[in-house]
Image (tube, rainbow, N blue to C red):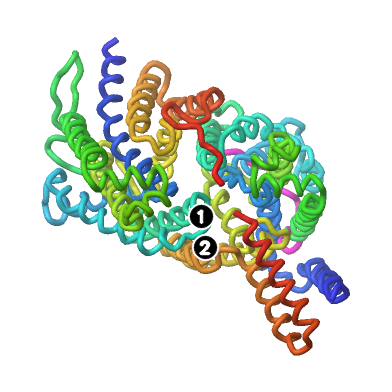
Amino acid sequence: MKKIKRFGLLALLALLLAFPQLFPDPAVTSIAIFALLYAGAATAWNLFSGYTGYISLGSAVFYGVGGYALALLCKGWNIQGGYVPFLLLPLVGLIASVFAIPLGWIALRSSRHVFVVITIAMFNIIQLLAYNLPGITNGSAGMFLPTPPWDAAFFNTPFYYVSLIVLLFSIGVSWWVRNSKYGLGLLAIRDDEDRALGLGVKTGPFKLVAYVISAFFIGMIGALIAYFIGSLYPPFAFTSVFDINVALMAFLGGIGTLVGPIVGAFLLEPLTQYITVQLQVVGLDQILFGSLMLAVILLLPEGIVPTLRRRWVKWTASRSATSPVAGIRGKGQALLVKGGREGKR
Amino acid sequence: MTLIIEAVVLGILTGSVYALMASGLTLIFGVMDIINIAQGILVILGAYLSYTLEKYLHIDIILGLLVTIPALFLLGMGIEWAFMRRIKRDRVMISILVTFAVALVIEGLLNFTFTANYVQLQAPYIDAAIPVFGFYLPYIYVFAFILSGVLLTLLYFLVYRTKFGFGLRASMQDRTAAALIGIDVERVQTITFGIGVALAAAGGMVFGATNPFNAASWGDLISRLLVIIVLGGMGSLRGALFASFAMLVISDVIDVVWSPIWASTVFFALLIVLLLFRPQGFFGRIEGRKQ
C-alpha cells in the first residue's frame, strides 16, 4: 500500500515536471500555471483557515500586497524583466508577512464568527488604500511590471517551473505543520479553543504564526501572478474573487486535509479559466460558479478527499468481511474514521 | 458649518435606511446563527424590482413596495427552505459560503437580465427638494426616514409584543430550550429569514433612489452592513440601530470636512479601533462557553 502511494506520487511529480514538454501550447500552459499557483494559494489558505477553523475571506490583501511589493521593488532597484524578479519572491513573501503581523494581531482578538467579518472589512480598507494612496500605488491608473525578454513559445516555461517550486514548497510547509506538534496545537484550537488553552496551547501566538506563514505564500503567489500578467490595478490586485475562490477550492477538496485544497484547485481553476475565456455571456460565469458552489457545499459538505477516503475504508472493510479477523479490523477502522469526523466541528 | 449640519442631517436620514437593512441581517444572525452575505444582493434585487415596476408598469416606487416587500418575503422563505435548512453542522461558517453562493447566482442573473450599466430609480420627489437650515434636502430622504421609522416600529412590535416575537426571542436565547417549551423553531426560522429579506426590499428602494447602482454594488454595501452589525454587537437590534446612525453620520461628516475618498476607509478603520477595546461590539454580550 505504502509502495503504491510512493510510486503514484513520483509518477505525478514526473508528469508535472514534463507537462510543458508534453503540452507546449501556451494556452494550455497558462491554465496550468494558474492551476499550480491557485493550488499553492489554497494550500497556504488551508494552513491557517483549515487547520485553525478561523475562516479568512480577506486573503486577497496579501495577494495584492505581494503584487505591489514586487512592482515597487522592481521600480525602486531598476530591475529589468528576466529571472531576477523570481529571486525577489522570498523577499516579497517576507514583506507580506510583515503586513500580516498587525492585521492578524487585531483580527485574531475576536471570536471566529467576527473574524470572518473583520477579514472582509480589512480587505475593503486595503483595496481602498490602493486607490487612495496614488503616491505609492499610482491609484486607479495602475502599475506595470517589467516584461521578460522571452519569446512567445518560451515565455510560459520559466513561470511554470517557478510556480511548481512555490507549490511544492507550500505543500512541504503544510505537510510539516500538519505532522508537527505545532500543527497539533492548531487542530486543537479548531476543535475546542478554550480546552486547548487550558491544556497549555498558546492559542494567540499559534494562530498568529499560522496567519503569517499563510500570508508569506499568498504574497509570493500574488507577486508571481502580477509578474505573469504584467500589470496591477487595485480592483484586480485586491479582488474578492481570489478570497472566495481559494476558500471554495479548500472546501471542495476537503478543508483541513493536506491534499484536499490541491485537488480542489486542480478541478476548479482550469474550469474557471475555461469559463471566463470561452463563455463571454455576461453573468453566466457567476451563475455557474455560484450553483456549483451551492451543490458542493450542500451535497459534499466534507469535501471530495475525506468522502472518498471514507468510501474507500468502507469498501475495503466490506470486501474483507469474509474473514472474521479482517472484518473486525475493518469495522474498527470505520469507527476510527467516524470518530475522527465527529470530533470536528 | 452649513455643510456639517447638512452632513449630520443626511447621515441621520440615510442611517435609518441602513438600520432597516442591518436589522434584517442581525435578526437572522440572532435567531439562526447565519451571517446572510446575500443581504447585499437582495437589497440590489429589491432596487431592481422597484426599477422594473416603475419603468415598465409605471407604478410609483413607494407604492411598488406593496409588491416588492411580499415578493422578497417569499423569496427569503424559499432560500431558507431550499438551502439554510440543509446546513447541519458548523452553521456560521457554512452559511457564509452558502449565502455567498446564493448572492453570486443572483448577481449573475441580474447582470444577465439588466446588463452591468448603472441605473437609478426615478420619481418626482427624488429630484425635488425643500430648504432646511440653509441647504436643500431632497424629499426622498425625508420619505425614507418616515418609511424606515414605520417599518422599524412594526418590527419592534412584532418582536416584543406578539406571540410570534416571543417565540423568536426564545429561539434567539436557546434553540433547544425553545423547542422544548413547544415553539416550532423551524417555522420561526423560516419566517424570520423571510422578514429579514423583506426588509431588504424597502432598503433597496431607498438605496436605488439615492444611488446609481448595478449588480456589482452589493460588495461595498454588504461590507458596510457587516461592519454595522459587528459594531452593534451581532444579534442585537438596538446595537444595529445605534451603529447605523453613528457610522453614517461619521462617514458623511468626514466626507465633507476631509474628502469623499477617505469616508469609507474611516468607516472600516473605526471598526478596527473599536474591536481593539471592545471585541464584542457596543451592545453584544460576551459569548459564553458553548458545550
Place of residue A184 in the rendered image (x, y in percent of width and height, measured from the top left)? 76, 49
Q: Residues within 10 Å of mark 2 (few under 14, many from 20)?
A: many
- Closer to the camera in the image, A333 or B119: A333
Q: Residues within 10 Å of mark 1 (few under 14, many from 20)?
A: many
User: What amino acid is at disc 1?
Assistant: Ile
Is there CB contact under 8 Å for labels 2 and 1? yes
User: What amino acid is at disc 2?
Assistant: Ile
Q: Residue at x 69, y 65 (%)?
A: A29
Q: What is the distance, in whole Å, between disc 2 and disc 1 at their CAs?
A: 8 Å
- Closer to the camera in the image, A241 or A121: A121
Rendering quarter of residue A38: bottom right
Q: Where are the magenta residues, as a range? A: A141-155
Chain under callout 1: B
Q: Residue at x 25, y 21 (%)?
A: B9
Q: Can see residue A54?
A: yes
For mark 1, what is the residue?
B94
Magenta highlight on residue A342: no
Residue B233, above or below B204: above
Residue that lies at the very extreme toward the top in this rendered image: B1
Q: Can see residue A74?
A: no
